Amino acid sequence: MATRRDALALAAALAAITLTPGAISTASADPVKIRIGWSTMPGHLIPVLYSKPDILKHYGKSYTVEPIRFRGSSPQITAMAAGEIDMAAFGPLVLALAVTNAHLDVKVVADIIQDGVNGSHSETFLVRADSGIEKVTDMKGKRVGTNAIGSASDTAMRAMFRKNKMQDKRDFTMVEVAFPNIPAMLDEGKIDLGTVLQPMSKQLLDTGKYKVLFTSSDAMGPSQLVFLAANGKFLDANRAALMDFFEDHVRAVRWFTDPKNRKEAIKIIADFMQQPPDSLSYLFTKEDYYRDPFMAPNVKSIQDSIDIAVDLGLAPRGIQVSPEHVDLSFVKEAQKRIEAGQ
């Protein structure tokens, strides 16, 4: 798995490629630096979206990007509050906590990945095949691996336990484990259930040693798993540059997800992750998460997920997402520009 250092190196390399003499001759100021939090690859795609300058119209002219890696959505609240990032990969509950606990002015601006939409992949919660665990209630007295309390995965897991009248601490024990470490913890018997992301989910299931106990869709139905959220003041202060950024951002996602570019796209991602391309064969198929073609987030799903999280007691109170905490003007403008062929 690539590190934050890798992401920073990539951003620096891109700046060197695109900021050639005369590249910003039409700009009235230095490009706006956009610091974006992310936590998982290849799901979030963020660290590689700016790796093909030929499909980016504005990179290095009106904006540059610094991708910054985090363990999950929750730690990005602190980073945004400290002014260390401008945008973040948030789950629904994290958005609510950012507003109610950290008192941040934060807006939902774009889709990242949606779960279980149109028959697409739904996040898997795996147990060992020889564990004797056949149903959720068999988890009584067991240990559960969660990447971060309050993350989208954590919320779905707790929703499933709630459906089965089970509670943390009373019926099972939650253990915080970074996503990359969950398979090893399962294998070593240190946890009994864990959230396993693609591509590792497919790889583990193919061995026959693991099985899916339930999915996020089983727990909550189709949902907006992760979305791009931005500091409202940053949006207001840099609106023109960010219109350019989102045009390129949406254009890049569309390039990566276009079937005719699939082989090259997978190679770029595999090189970044330091994995063989064959291990990512599921990418941009029905075994992958759903991504909206113009990165429009499902705001209703975000609201529904927050309401579920509050009902689970994961937050003292919820928020009304729309209209105060949503700004879709950027992806709407991106769609207009792309469809107009500009």
Image: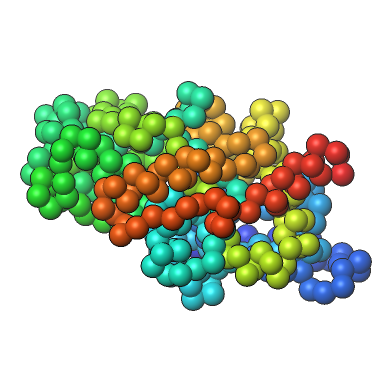
Whether residue 59 is situated above or below residue 207 in the rendered picture: below
Q: Residue at x 87, y 73 (%)?
A: 28
- Residue 182: give x, y in percent of width and height: 29, 47
Residue closer to the observer: 256 or 291: 291
Q: Residue at x 40, y 48 (%)?
A: 306
Using the rendered image of the protein, determine whether residue 250 is visible from the camera's viewpoint.
Answer: yes
Looking at the image, residue 107 sits to the left or right of residue 116; the answer is right
Whether residue 94 is situated above or below residue 195 in the rendered picture: below
Q: How is the image coloured?
A: rainbow
Residue closer to the observer: 135 or 51: 135
Whether residue 258 is situated above or below residue 19 in the rendered picture: above
- Residue 231: give x, y in percent of width and height: 58, 65
Q: Residue at x 18, y 34 (%)?
A: 164
Looking at the image, residue 38 sits to the left or right of residue 19; the answer is left
Using the rendered image of the protein, determine whether residue 270 is visible from the camera's viewpoint.
Answer: no
Looking at the image, residue 218 sits to the left or right of residue 236; the answer is left
- Residue 73: give x, y in percent of width and height: 43, 56
Looking at the image, residue 99 sits to the left or right of residue 328; the answer is left
> Which quadrant of the figure contains the C terminus?
top right
Residue closer to the observer: 245 or 160: 160
Q: How many marks?
A: 0
- Residue 31: give x, y in percent of width and height: 76, 69
Q: Residue at x 45, y 63 (%)?
A: 99
